[in-house]
């Protein structure tokens, strides 16, 4: 998983767009559904007005607290369906995902780092993928919250969907890593096992139980076991098939004389080698850590 460091431009863009949705609705007191005005209760409008700024920009821990207040009053209310419609259909379904992702400058899925965050619909139009870390069906009031919108590829978005991690969503921040929270205890690294050059296997080494739960919940181990074979095999062949030190010569002596180390890795392997830049190119974390291990191999 890649941690997200949001840009100022993305934060300001999100604040502007979501504030308008909230303020317009508070002012009107209703939403449109099927071309009909549906009035929201005074009590809910008061709640929205009270928490609107935090619903837009609060960190995950605070969002969970606000959601608890909402659950007490509205999760069994006859108004719940209308409230869900406001946050999801009126709000999120009309949110400019692609513009937001461009400003956020996260180019690959933060869960797997193997796919770009843009997909194509049936009309072959590019569309942005954003996962709701707290699922919007269970946490509707967080459907537009900045720190609940996670750049994701279609596959990981579908894998995660609305399933709850072990311990439930109320304890999720304790049990699994959130991409906006830089938790060093959830770090993991890629390695490999090798029965033969033709049958390499990706291995993930985790540093804590929380890291293991995060990997398992997002199925990162399964994804890399089934879909990293070619990348891993190519790197192993460069290291072992051509000569004992071919990889060292390629990276540090051939291209290393002509350009920076970052440029050499980008040119030769199509990856970024700085952790803060992993998101820019698919498989950057995986390939960088495998290459580091191969360069140390006897």
Image (cartoon, rainbow, N blue to C red):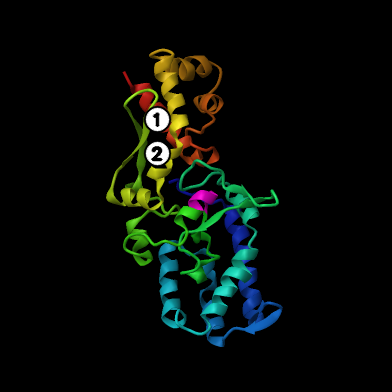
Quadrant assignment for the C terminus: top left
Res 125 label? none
- Which portion, as a residue range, is magenta? 151-157
Q: Is residue 288 magenta?
A: no
Q: Secondary structure at mark 2?
A: helix
Q: Which label sits in the foreground, 2 or 1? A: 2
Name the residue: 41% across, 71% down. 65
* x and y, in percent, of residue 44 in the image: 53, 82
Category of crowding for the residue at label 1, using alpha-carbon neighbours closer than 10 angstroms: few (below 14), some (14–19), many (at least 20): many
Front-lying residue, 204 or 65:
204
Residue 60 percent coordinates (x, y): 43, 62
Residue 191 visible, this angle: yes
Query: Residue 225 — which label?
Result: 2
Report if residue 49 is visible in the image.
no
Answer above or below: position of 167 versus 295.
below
Residue 265, above or below 276: above
- The residue closer to the viewer here, 188 or 129, is 129
Q: Which residue is mark 1?
A: 290
Residue for point 31% across, 26% down: 195
The picture quadrant where one finds residue 40 is bottom right
- Which residue, as the protein is rendered here, is positioned at the far top? 243
Q: Is residue 218 above or below residue 37?
A: above
Kindly indicate the quadrant of the structure image that contains residue 90: bottom right
Farthest residue in the bottom direction?
42
Residue at horizontal 54 percent and vertical 30 percent from the top: 270
Q: Is residue 287 above or below residue 23?
A: above
Left or right, 251 with respect to 120, comes to left
Q: CA distance from mark 2 to mark 1?
A: 14 Å
In the rendering, at what x and y percent does residue 57 appear?
A: 52, 64
């Amino acid at each position: 998983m890649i941690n997200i460091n949001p840009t100022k431009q993305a934060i300001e863009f999100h604040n502007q767009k979501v504030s308008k949705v909230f303020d317009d609705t508070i002012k009107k007191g209703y939403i449109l559904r099927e071309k009909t005005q549906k009035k929201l209760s005074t009590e809910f409008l008061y709640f929205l007005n009270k928490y609107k700024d935090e619903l837009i920009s609060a960190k995950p821990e605070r969002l969970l607290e606000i959601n608890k207040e909402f659950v007490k009053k509205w999760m069994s209310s006859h108004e719940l369906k209308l409230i869900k419609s406001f946050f999801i259909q009126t709000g999120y379904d009309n949110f400019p995902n692609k513009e937001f992702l461009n400003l956020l400058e996260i180019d690959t899925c933060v869960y797997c780092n193997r796919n770009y965050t843009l997909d194509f619909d049936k009309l072959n139009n590019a569309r942005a993928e954003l996962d709701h870390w707290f699922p919007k069906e269970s946490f509707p009031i967080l459907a537009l919250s900045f720190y609940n919108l996670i750049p994701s590829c279609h596959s990981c978005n579908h894998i995660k969907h609305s399933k709850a991690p072990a311990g439930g969503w109320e304890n999720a921040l304790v049990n699994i890593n959130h991409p906006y929270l830089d938790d060093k205890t959830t770090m993991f690294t890629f390695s490999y096992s090798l029965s033969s050059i033709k049958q390499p296997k990706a291995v993930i080494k985790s540093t804590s139980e929380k890291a293991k739960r995060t990997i398992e919940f997002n199925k990162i181990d399964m994804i890399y076991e089934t879909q990293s074979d070619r990348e891993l095999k190519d790197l192993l062949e460069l290291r072992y098939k051509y000569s004992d030190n071919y990889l060292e010569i390629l990276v540090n002596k051939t291209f290393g004389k002509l350009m920076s180390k970052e440029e050499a890795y980008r040119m030769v392997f199509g990856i970024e080698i700085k952790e803060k830049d992993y998101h820019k190119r698919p498989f950057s974390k995986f390939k960088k850590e495998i290459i580091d291990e191969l360069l140390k191999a006897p």
